[in-house]
Image (spheres, rainbow, N blue to C red):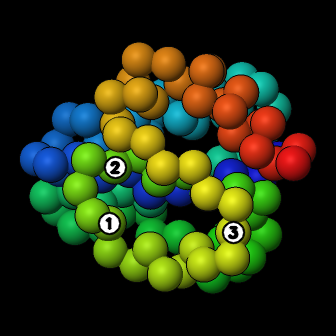
Amino acid sequence: MKIVGVAACTSGIAHTYIAKEKLVKAAESLGHEIKIETQGTVGTEGKLEKKDIDNADVVIIAADIKISGKERFEGKKMVEVPTSIVIKSPKGLMKKVEDLVKE
């Protein structure tokens, strides 16, 4: 499965990057390809390209704030959760994502 997503938290520091790390580890441990863009205090890092989004099976938005560029994901299957869910239960989230893609 190919996953893209965005991680962003209110301060744009810790939870943004912890959420990204947890998502990447959980997805890769299950054999999925994943690319996560971060939107934090230093701006956008790892910006998703159109081809990444076009090729993705699903989008994960792990954010505690409104993200910029959400319209890029229109028409894609999407899971939106706060960063705390990703940090506490990344594998549980991946199960939810897998179930969504199977629908």
Task: Kindly check if marks 3 and 1 are in contact, taking CB atoms under 8 A apart as contact.
Answer: no
Marks 2 and 1: in contact by CB < 8 Å? yes
Report how far apart the C-alphas of labels 3 and 1 lie in the structure. Answer: 16 Å
In this view, 46 is above or below 62: below
Disc nearer the start of the sequence (2/3): 2
Q: Which residue is mark 3?
A: 76
Q: Residue at x 53, y 35 (%)?
A: 23
Is residue 91 something that shows in the picture?
A: yes
Disc number at residue 26?
none
Asked whether 33 or 67 is in front, the reply is 67
Assess disc 3: are there few (<14), some (14-19) or many (≥20) residues with their C-alpha within 10 Å of its C-alpha.
few
Q: Are marks 2 and 3 in contact (CB under 8 Å)?
A: no
- What amino acid type is highlighted by mark number 2? Ala
| Mark number, residue 63 | 2
- For the residue marked with disc 3, what is the amino acid? Lys
Residue 24's x, y, as percent?
57, 36
Disc 1: which residue: 67
Give me the residue at 88% from left, 44% from top: 102
Tag 1: Cα neighbours inside 10 Å, few (<14), some, or many (≥20)?
Answer: some
User: Which image quadrant is residue 30 in?
Assistant: top right
SS for dot 3 = loop
Q: Is residue 90 above or below residue 11?
A: above
**Separation of disc 1 and disc 2 at Cα?**
7 Å
